[in-house]
Amino acid sequence: MKSDKQTATANEIPAQGQIKSRKRVAERGEVFTAEREVNAMLDLVKQETERIDSRFLEPACGNGNFLAEILRRKLAVVARQYEHQEAQIHLQSAIAVSSIYGVEIMMDNVVECRQRLLDILCEWYGSAMHGAVAPAELCAVWRYLLERNILWGDALSLCLPLPADATLIQRRDAEPIIFSEWSFIKDMVLRKDYRLASLLQAQSQSVPDLFSDQGDEAYLPPKAAKEYKPIHYMKIPTYYDTQQ
């Protein structure tokens, strides 16, 4: 997935709404991808954007232009396939959120992205459920998943951001980005935590003579940094805090 933030050159004049400040453009090259380009790119993988459990990772997600549109497309499918099925609306919305991941180096963008996606969920729920307000317990599930999946980090170093003057020792010991994989079996969910670096390394390593069901070259997944027992998905906001 292409970064939500594009690097601006000296000859480019970003459209209104694509930048937060010229200072941020100069320091970070922060220019947000316009809606037209977001939709055009996602249409190239349209079938995947309409699979509720298809996983997407945006390595420089900004305030969520790509992730917001992916979520909208997934939720549209949920509403269409599970109309008038409240229990499934709840479950499938959680699955949709759990499949969306983002890394962003600017903390204010992380906070804004999480809130933006949560707002989309709440607005969608009211439409899908004919004006009903999303239950507080379900909102708590969405919020927890977003806090675990939209992370503050440096997608180049695959670690939490460090100051520019960080020492070699500090860089060596930088805290790694750790994502949670959420696997749903009916209304139960299994969480496994992985270092992002391990996931990328495993994906780049082919396994001789091993192929997937679709004929693609397969790879062996990395060992999880931590694995939790399966729980009911509505316990997500409360259970894990007691297991740290």
Image (cartoon, grey):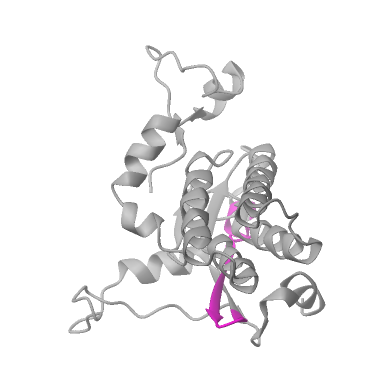
Q: Which residues are magenta?
A: 170-190
- Horizontal side of residue 44 vs 171, given as left or right: left
**Where residue 47 sits: x, y (%)?**
32, 57
Q: Residue at the spot x=49%, y=27% of the render? A: 29
Please tell me in which quadrant of the rendered image residue 115 appears.
top right
Q: Please give the name of the residue rendered at 73% of the width and 65% of the height, measured from the top-left corner.
A: 138
Percent from the top left, x then y, of residue 185? 54, 84
Q: Nearer the viewer, residue 233 or 157?
A: 233
Residue located farthest toward the bottom when viewing the structure as drawn: 229
Q: Quadrant of residue 141?
A: bottom right
- How many dots with numbers? 0
Q: Nearer the viewer, residue 127 or 48?
A: 127
Residue 222 in magenta? no
Q: Residue at x 42, y 64 (%)?
A: 54
Q: Is residue 22 above or below residue 133?
A: above
Percent coordinates x, y for residue 130 in the rendering: 66, 53
Q: Tell me, yes or no, if residue 41 can be seen here.
A: yes
Q: Position of residue 206 (x, y in %)?
A: 26, 74
In the displayed structure, 234 sits above or below 41; it is: below
Q: Which residue is located at x 54 percent, y 64 percent?
A: 83
Q: Quadrant of the C terminus?
A: bottom right
Query: Is 34 left, or right, of 20 in this rendering?
Result: left
The answer to which of 163 and 50 lies nearer the viewer is: 50
Q: Is residue 52 left or right of residue 204?
A: right
Q: Is residue 60 visible?
A: no
